[in-house]
Image (spheres, rainbow, N blue to C red):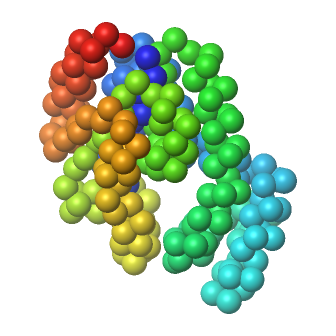
Amino acid sequence: MILCVTGSMAAGKNAASSILEKKGFSSIDCDAVVHQILSEKDFVLRVVNEFESEAREKKISLLKNDGTLDRRALGEVVFSDKKLLERQESLVFPEVENRVRDFVCAQKNAVINATVLWKIPALVRDCNAVLFVDAPILLRFFRVKKRDSLPVLQIVRRFLSQKNLFSKYRLLNADTYIVKNTGDFRALELKIDEILGRILARGV
């Protein structure tokens, strides 16, 4: 069985994935895959070349003192403009697709933990179901502030970039289940158990 665990920023995707890992699934975090790609020298070079002029206009340096990519600085650049974000994704997503598919093919039961997997439709079609983890926007906002210490404006931009996220998966005709994450870890686990039962009842 292959599941996509998705949802808006700070909704609880990682918690849901860890619950599924306890139940025998192997999980791959697409954010971690992107971070790995952006740590590799050839990709760093490509990203810097792609966004050098935009970063210069904003007086932002895309490289840290040690020559590695400053992902937070890159975020300030690409999340300010939809077209810039699309340019970054066109560089990175084909490699994400290759690495995720290699991982999934080697597993019996796999979880793809990803916010915007809808932008790689071929991977969504590989999934038996999509678990869409959701939580109230204020709860998500304070989780991000505590976890990442991002400026308020940057958080708002990232939230806006994920607007109507649920509908993106429905448009792909994915078998999608909403998982409300408004309680504690045990409550989330019970909800996931119930959804797994419904998926298995379909004969997956």
Q: Eyeballing the image, is 128 above or below 29?
A: above
Q: Eyeballing the image, is 190 above or below 179?
A: above
Q: Residue at x 68, y 35 (%)?
A: 98
The N terminus sits in image quarter: top left
Relative to 103, is 15 on the left or the right?
A: left
Q: Eyeballing the image, is 69 above or below 112?
A: below
Q: How far from the left and from the top, in percent, is residue 188?
A: 21, 32
Q: How far from the left and from the top, in percent, is residue 167?
A: 31, 52
Q: Eyeballing the image, is 152 above or below 143?
A: below
Q: Residue at x 37, y 18 (%)?
A: 22
The C terminus sits in image quarter: top left
The image quarter containing residue 71 is: bottom right
Q: How far from the left and from the top, in percent, is residue 66?
A: 79, 62
Q: How far from the left and from the top, in percent, is residue 3?
A: 41, 27
Relative to 192, is 163 on the left or the right?
A: right
* Residue 47 visible, this angle: yes
Q: Nearer the viewer, residue 113 or 119?
A: 119
Q: Residue at x 24, y 12 (%)?
A: 201
Counting the numbered discs, the total is: 0
Q: Residue at x 54, y 35 (%)?
A: 123
* Residue 12 visible, this angle: no
